[in-house]
Image (tube, rainbow, N blue to C red):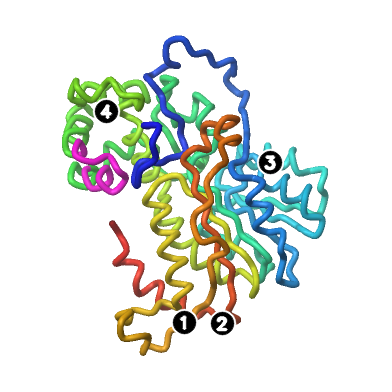
Amino acid sequence: MNSQRSDGDFEKTPSQGGLHSPAGSTDERQPGQFTHAPVLAAEVVQGFRDRRTPSTVIVDATVGLAGHSQRILDELDWAEVIGIDRDRRALEQAQDRLSRYGGRARLVHARFGEISDAVAPVTAVAGVLADLGVSSMQLDDPGRGFSFRFDAPLDMRMDPDGEDADVAGFLLAVSTKDLIRIFRENGVGTLSIRYANALKSQLPVATTGELAEIIVSATPARLRGGRTHPATKVFQALRVSVNYEASELIHFLPAALGLLDRGGVMQVISYHSGEDRLVKRFIRLVETGGCICPPRLGCTCGAEPAGERTTRHAIIPSDDELAANPRSRSARMRALRRTANDVADVLERYWQQVPTWHG
């Protein structure tokens, strides 16, 4: 990734110069040892600090290694946390980390799009947090196949114990046409056709190293020398696809709003433009009640606002956080406070409109 941010060019993974660490760099971590620095942790806690609801429950919908949850429990003495994750291995480590909080913390194995069922019997909460994308634990485990820093089986599933196909199987099953579409939708750009054809012509692709080398070979020589490895966005696009991340987010947003008590806050941290655009559009819909009337004519469709953003613009990491945790550099957090008792009309309008939001 270039050092500059641009729409469609931000993501959670760090820039990588090749299949291994760039020349002159070192990485002292050993397989099985994972660093964990929750992104925008202070800002997340601050967003929940001004509680305006009788509920004391905050849902960490992508709990991972529980860095955010731990900060919430440490700094908000009124808070209880329900943590959700689809990765059983992450939940095991999160359980160890949160065990000292006793009944203030509960963990559930589920997808974050299943938030309503996952928190049952709770039906109203004070806050919801979703930290999207892939975690440091998943990136830094060679066996998970998320990173081309390690030559490993081509997996990338966030729930490796589940029934979904891994990337190697996905590439065998997907059509060239659909692969091109997936690449285009996830920011691969003008090389989408070239990369899709190269991959489909060299199947099976079994390892991360093989995939990265195919992409490098298919990349014009003039584009191979940048700071960002040519395969970075291809890896991201395939990860997003095999984990159904876009579909999960589409289902999560309305479910989270419906779960919030009036006065409750939802905070979403995203790492690439597609996610951020969907979150931004959802917040706009909630703020306008889903009104589709021409602005110059005023609203005549009966839409009623159901929430309000808590900050005017997305929150990004501070310079100090960027220096301490380079993986945070692509993060953008947007937050919404529910203001309406009844959000049924807004949610109905969402499901009517969201199919037109792509692109």
- Which amino acid does the dot numbered 1 rest on? Asp
Which of the labelled discs sits on residue 94, or is there none? 3
Q: Nearer the viewer, residue 102 or 38?
A: 38
Judged by depth in the image, the label closer to the viewer, 1 or 3, is 1
Question: Which image quarter holds the N terminus?
Answer: top left
User: Pointers 1 and 2 in contact (CB under 8 A)?
Assistant: yes
Q: Residue at x 74, y 39 (%)?
A: 97
Which kind of residue does numbered mark 2 sit on?
A: Asp
Local SS, label 2? loop
Q: Say which element carries label 1.
A: helix
Residue of label 4: 204
Look at the magenta stretch and give its main secondary structure.
helix
Q: Position of residue 161 (x, y in %)?
A: 52, 40
Please name the residue shown 19% across and 22% down the image: 222
Decide: is 300 above or below 239: below
Q: Which residues are magenta?
A: 180-192
